[in-house]
């Protein structure tokens, strides 16, 4: 019988089923976040009002900046402070959730814009 188990270079600790599910969920969330951040950027560029473009552009820049910060700080092996480790753990879950939530908000925003009648000036 075949079993799919992640293979590491050092053949280190064996992951349990729950840990494997958590790892795959986090990786799937990040994959979805990367794809949806590209879509969010396109939606933001297509916004009709400049003020809403600036607001959502700043939100976009915030979570992209936090993602780069997480990868820079998280890739360091010399993290000694517990609060930095905790912040990296929180960001690993919070960034994909915020990107997906922003995508949902932008979809609702676009639908409202399409259903709103055009104003004659």
Image: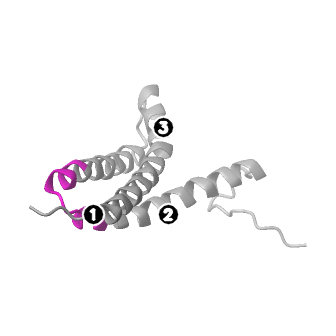
Image quadrant in which you'd find residue 38: bottom left
Seen at 30% across and 60% down, the residue is 116
Q: For residue 52: magenta?
A: yes
Question: How far across and down, in percent of the image, does residue 28 sit?
Answer: 56, 60
Q: Nearer the viewer, residue 82 or 78?
A: 82
Is residue 16 visible in the rendered image? The answer is: no
Question: How far across and down, in percent of the image, does residue 105 sit?
Answer: 40, 52
Question: How far across and down, in percent of the image, does residue 89 sit?
Answer: 50, 39
Which residues make up the magenta segment?
A: 42-55
Q: Nearer the viewer, residue 105 or 36?
A: 105
Residue at the disc numbered 2: 31
- Who comes first in sequence, dot 2 or dot 1? 2
Residue at the disc numbered 3: 90
Q: Residues within 10 Å of mark 3 (few under 14, many from 20)?
A: few
Q: Residues within 10 Å of mark 1 (few under 14, many from 20)?
A: few
Question: How far across and down, in percent of the image, does residue 107 sit?
Answer: 40, 60
* Mark 2 vs mark 1, CA separation in Å: 36 Å
* Mark 3 vs mark 2, CA separation in Å: 17 Å
Point out which mark residue 117 bears: 1
Point out which mark residue 55 bears: none
Seen at 43% across and 43% down, the residue is 77
Q: Residue furthest left?
A: 121
């Amino acid at each position: 019988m075949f079993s799919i188990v992640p293979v590491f270079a050092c053949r280190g600790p064996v992951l349990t089923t729950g840990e494997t599910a958590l790892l795959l969920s986090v990786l799937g969330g990040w994959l979805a976040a990367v794809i949806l951040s590209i879509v969010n950027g396109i939606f933001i560029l297509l916004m009709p009002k400049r003020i809403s473009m600036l607001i959502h552009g700043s939100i976009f820049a915030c979570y992209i900046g936090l993602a780069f910060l997480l990868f820079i700080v998280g890739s360091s092996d010399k993290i000694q402070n517990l609060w930095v480790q905790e912040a990296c753990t929180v960001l690993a879950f919070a960034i994909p959730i915020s990107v997906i939530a922003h995508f949902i908000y932008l979809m609702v925003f676009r639908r409202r814009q399409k259903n709103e009648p055009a104003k004659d000036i």
